[in-house]
Amino acid sequence: MATIPGSPSSPNATYPLHGDELEPGLLYAVLTYRGELASWNWSFFVPNPAVTPIGSSGTLFHVVDNAVREWKFEMEVKDVVSSPHVVAIVRLANVSFLGGYEDIVGDDSLLPMFKSVAIPPPGSAGVSEFCSRTWFLDAICVLHDCCVAQCDDVWLLEREIRRCAFSAMDKFLQNSASRNVCTPILLVDLICGVSGTGSTNPLATWHETSF
């Protein structure tokens, strides 16, 4: 298993990040609470470095459904670091090689990759198994094929992201019970790959902090 400079000797180790914001030019996974202990909405997020603290604004890529399970892809501007619904933020890959923020989230970069991920039409056989998690994992495969992020085992990546979210749920539920505004977020450095600088395996390092 590969590691990166400054990472702990054990891939399961955690240590505090410096500062209380995300990093520009990075692609993150964001898991938000759905009202059930082991169920989250899965999405991708690119922070806008022009807005501080970084992570208080950025572009979220995800799929949403309605009451009759009609799914559609959406991208929207979101604040993830102070959202009361965010459980975990997982760093996936350095995408700064795609250009500046507007380039990264624009029509010629990540957006068409995410739009290429198939969404089953209403009433089709695939709807019953489709969810934001399956869309997210399919999107990871597209990013891998496009050399944006290296992930040789998407199921291993899913398992580790789920473990991160489970680790964060105790803090999340305690915070919700006390009705605090700011939710303690588990921010994990779980690298899929860094394009252009040599590949790294998933689970390279874990960092933990609370916003």
Image (cartoon, helix red, strand yellow):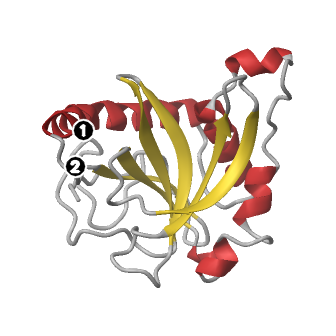
Label 1 with label 2: CB-CB less than 8 Å: yes
Residue at x 51%, y 74% (from the top left corner): 25
Q: What is the three-letter code of the residue carrying label 1?
A: Phe
Going by the image, does 97 lie left or right of 45? right
Tell me which numbered mark, 1 or 2, is placed earlier along the sequence: 1
Residue 112 falls in image quadrant: bottom right
Give the percent coordinates (x, y) of residue 173: 22, 32
Residue at x 39%, y 27% (from the top left corner): 35
**Image height of 79 relative to 97, above or below:** above
Q: Which secondary structure, mark 2?
A: loop
Q: CA distance from mark 1 to mark 2?
A: 6 Å
Q: Which residue is mark 2?
A: 184
Furthest-left residue in view?
178
Q: Which secondary structure, mark 1?
A: helix
Residue at x 83%, y 14% (from the top left corner): 125
Q: Which residue is mark 1?
A: 172
**Image height of 92 relative to 127, above or below:** below
**Which quadrant: the C terminus?**
bottom left
Foreground: 142 or 182? 182
**Image height of 144 relative to 65, above or below:** below
Foreground: 177 or 152? 177
Give the percent coordinates (x, y) of residue 83: 36, 54
